[in-house]
Image (spheres, grey):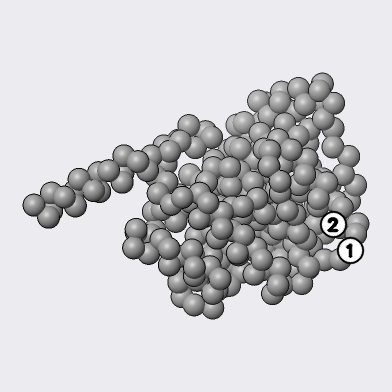
Amino acid sequence: MLTRNLLIAAGFVLLNSCATSPTGRTQFIYMPDNQVDQMGLQAFDSMKSKNPVSRNSRVNQFAQCVAYAITQQTGGQWEVVVFEDETLNAFALPGNKIGVHTGLINLVDNADQLAAVVGHEVGHVLSRHSNERLSQETAVSTGLAMVQAVTQPQTAMGQTALGLLGVGAQYGVILPYSRIHETEADTIGLDLMARAGFDPRQSINLWLKMDKAAQGGQPIEFMSTHPSHASRIDNLQQSMNRALQIQQQAWNQGRQPRCSK
C-alpha cells in the first residue's frame, strides 16, 4: 500500500512538473521559480560583496548599453554589473541579474560580439535552465536546503547549489550545462541579439576570438563550462539566415544599438 501511494505521489509530481522551453522542448521543472530567483539574487549579492566591481564609467556604460538593448527584448528590470576580473566571462542569473568581466570587454572588438555572449547567457535564464537542473538534481526534501545553501558558498552543498545556478566556477566547482541547454541558449541568444538590432554574424567572430585566446593560454572561464567552439559555430551558422532576417526587421523598426566601446 505504501509503495502504491509513493508511486501515485511520484506520478503527481511528474504530471505537475512538465514545462515547455521557448524552443518547444519539454522540461522537468519542479522548483518554484520564485525560489530559484531568490537563489540567483543571493548569489549575485554574494558575488558583489566578495569580488571587485569596476568603477570605470566607460566600461560600465558599454556593458550596460549592450545588456539593456538585449533585455529590452525580454521585458523586466535587469541589473548589470561589471566585475574587475581578467577571465573572459559573462553570466546571467535567475532574478534578472547580469555579470560581465572586464577581461571579456577587453577581448571583444565591438558591441555585437559582447551581445553574442550576453544574449546567450540571458537565453539560459529565459529557458529556466537553472530551475531545470536544480529540479533534476534535488529532491523535495533537499530543495529548501539548496535555496539556503547558496548563501554559504564555502560549504559542499553551497558549492553544488552555485554550480547548478551556473556560477559554480567562481568557487572552484564547474557543473557544465548540457549540450541541449547550450544549443538552446545559442539559438535564443542569436535571436535576441538580432531582435535588438545587433549583427548576428559577429557571434561567429566572437567564438573565433575565444578560440584564439584559449590557444594563447588566456584564462577563459566562460569556455571552461561550455562545449567546443567548432560545434557551436556550426549550430550558429545553421540559424544565421533567419537571424539576419530578424536583424533587418529590427533595423526597419529603428532598433540599431549604438554602444561605443
Cα–Cα span, label 2 and label 1: 6 Å
The residue that mark 1 highlights is 56
Q: Quadrant of residue 195?
A: top right
From this view, report whether residue 5 is shown above or below residue 218: above
Whether residue 199 is visible: no
Q: Quadrant of residue 57?
A: bottom right
- Residue drawn at (71%, 46%), measured in percent from left and top? 77
Q: Residues within 10 Å of mark 2 (few under 14, many from 20)?
A: many
Identify the amino acid type marked 1. Asn
| Horizontal side, residue 214 vs residue 111: left or right | left
Residue 106 or residue 216, whichever sits in front: 106
Residue 189 or residue 99, whichever sits in front: 99
- Residues at circles 2 and 1 in contact by the CB criterion of under 8 Å: yes
Q: Position of residue 89 (x, y in %)?
A: 69, 59
For the image, the number of numbered tags is 2
* Secondary structure category for the residue under label 2: helix
* Secondary structure category for the residue under label 1: loop
The residue that mark 2 highlights is 60
Q: Residues within 10 Å of mark 1 (few under 14, many from 20)?
A: few
Q: Residue furthest left?
A: 1
| Horizontal side, residue 214 vs residue 252: left or right | left
Q: Which mark is residue 175?
A: none
Residue 222 or residue 62, whichever sits in front: 62
Q: Position of residue 154 (x, y in %)?
A: 54, 78
Residue 157 or residue 6, whichever sits in front: 6
Identify the amino acid type marked 2. Asn
- Residue drawn at (42%, 46%), measured in percent from left and top? 29
- Residue drawn at (35%, 41%), measured in percent from left and top? 16
Q: Quadrant of residue 60?
A: bottom right
Q: Position of residue 114 (x, y in %)?
A: 76, 48
